Every structure is written in structure tokens, then in C-alpha cells.
Image (cartoon, rainbow, N blue to C red):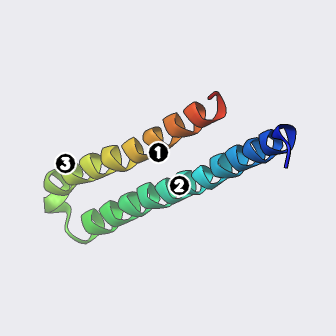
Amino acid sequence: MDAESMQYIAEAVKYFSVGLISLVMFGVAKGVSQIWVTIISSVSRNPGVKNDVSLFAWGGAAITEAIALYALGLAIIMLYM
């Protein structure tokens, strides 16, 4: 293979990898929605634990969203390198 063909393959692999990173974004969206479904269910069953559960829900959502931001940063770095 010549250098030009290898460059085209490298570009294709780069875009494919960024596409796979979008699956991480889907997983994060699914995780955050599951966190909120669980907190709503917990508070509806026992309203007295709202403050305790809310603290952990915000923490879990923040950590889950951090994963999405890391994946987004990685995708941007991969696209422009």
C-alpha cells in the first residue's frame, strides 16, 4: 500500500472511532435517565428520604455526566489531531 492509501485508512479509522465514542454518549444518557427514574420512584414511595436521596442523585448524575464530557473531549481531540 502506498502512503496515500494509508492516509485514507487512517482517516476512516479516526471517524469510525469518533462514531464509537457516540455510543458512550448514549450510555451516559441512559444512565442519567435511570438515576432520575430511581430517585422519583424512591421519593414517591418514601417522601421522608427526599433530602438524603437527592444528595446522592446529584452526585451520581454529576459523575455520569463527567464521563460524557471526557468522551466528548476525547472525540474532539481525535478529530483535530
Residue 35 appears at what percent x and percent y?
Answer: 36, 60
Determine whether, in the image, residue 40 is placed left or right of residue 50. Answer: right
Inter-mark Cα distance, 3 to 1: 20 Å
The residue to which callout 1 is attached is 68
The residue to which callout 3 is attached is 55
Determine whether, in the image, residue 11 is placed left or right of residue 79. Answer: right
Inter-mark Cα distance, 2 to 1: 7 Å
Q: Are marks 2 and 1 in contact (CB under 8 Å)?
A: yes
In this rendered view, identify the residue nearer to me: 22 or 51.
22
Q: Earlier in the sequence, mark 3 or mark 1?
A: 3
Q: Residue at x 82, y 42 (%)?
A: 8
Three-letter code for the amino acid on which mark 2 is drawn: Val
Inter-mark Cα distance, 2 to 3: 25 Å
Q: Earlier in the sequence, mark 2 or mark 3?
A: 2
Between tags 2 and 3, which lies in front? Answer: 2
Residue 78 image-quadrant placement:
top right
Residue 13 appears at what percent x and percent y?
Answer: 71, 49
The residue to which callout 2 is attached is 24
